[in-house]
Image: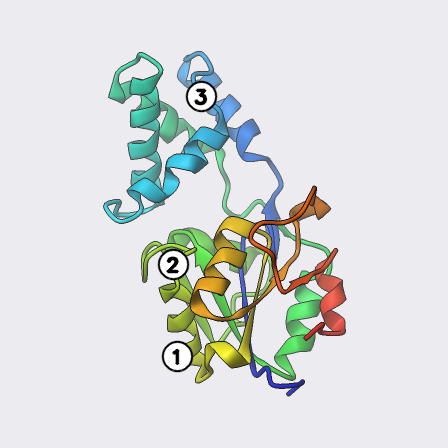
Amino acid sequence: MTGDVDAICFDLDDTLCTYRRSGADVLTRAFDRAGVARLWAVEEYHDLYSDYLAESTDADDLRRRCFAELAVDAGHDRETGRVVADEFAAVRDQEAVDPLPGAREAVEALSDRYRLGLVTNGAPEMQRTKLEAIGLADSFETVVYAGYDTPAKPAAEPFTTALDALESTPGRAVHVGNSLSSDVAGARAAGLRSVWVPFENRSTGTPDPTPDYTLETLADLATPPW
């Protein structure tokens, strides 16, 4: 082990992998396929996401609920939103993801020294498909599908659940992720140290909340900063 750390948790989306086609592009194609004007932006969908996690049965159901509400907000009926949601699902290919630079190498190198877990906000079947697509399906001792197994990040529970499986404690663990609002804030809530790797190095101004460590790429984990 290095220092007093014995466990590392990773986020998945835009930390270890990213879609080849952006959510904004997929939404545009969904509107076109549904024959509907562009009624909302993908960011509005993301803002509603957590509101429906607890009551949705899977990722498709969650999206249909979100899109139905967004359609009503835009002056249309709920069915219009559901039609767009179904077209979004038809366009989005969960296998069409690529590992981010240094992701596989970092996970492989760190697995020799630490126990590894994954803490991801996302439906199990969707996230498992991504892990398989990037060759990391067997790289983690435990995977917590936050929002399904537990409350979504930034709640503390996804992190503590992972650490229980890894037989570690918050004081001996770090979490690596790209999101200040879910990864850094969640790690802080659970008492883990946080490693922030901004997606495509999109860091502007002073990060809030402040991560314990900031890296430009996952390749920098070859020399752990803790």
- Residue 136 occupies which quadrant of the picture? bottom right
- Residue 144 occupies which quadrant of the picture? bottom left
Where is residue 26 drawn, in percent x and y? 52, 30
Question: Pointer 1: residues within 10 angstroms few (<14), some, or many (20+)?
Answer: few
> Residue sitting at 35 percent across and 24 percent down?
70
Where is residue 56 drawn, in percent x and y? 26, 45
Query: Who comes first in sequence, dot 2 or dot 3?
Result: 3
Residue at mark 2: 155
Does residue 213 appear left or right of residue 147 in this picture? Answer: right
> Residue sitting at 35 percent across and 28 percent down?
67
Q: Is residue 195 above or below residue 35?
A: below
Q: Amino acid at mark 2?
A: Ala
- For the residues labelled 3 and 1, the Cα–Cα distance comes to 40 Å
Front label number (2 vs 3)? 2
- Residue 151 occupies which quadrant of the picture? bottom left
Report the residue that reaches farthest toward the left: 55
Where is residue 225 drawn, in percent x and y? 71, 72
Front label number (1 vs 2)? 2
| Picture disc at residue 164 | 1
**Mark 3 secondary-structure assignment:** loop
The front one of 157 and 130 is 157
**Mark 2 secondary-structure assignment:** loop
Q: Quadrant of the C terminus?
A: bottom right
- For the residues labelled 1 and 2, the Cα–Cα distance comes to 16 Å
| Picture disc at residue 119 | none
Question: Pointer 2: residues within 10 angstroms few (<14), some, or many (20+)?
Answer: many
| Picture disc at residue 40 | 3
Query: Who comes first in sequence, dot 3 or dot 1?
Result: 3
Where is residue 124 drawn, in percent x and y? 38, 57
Query: Who comes first in sequence, dot 1 or dot 2?
Result: 2
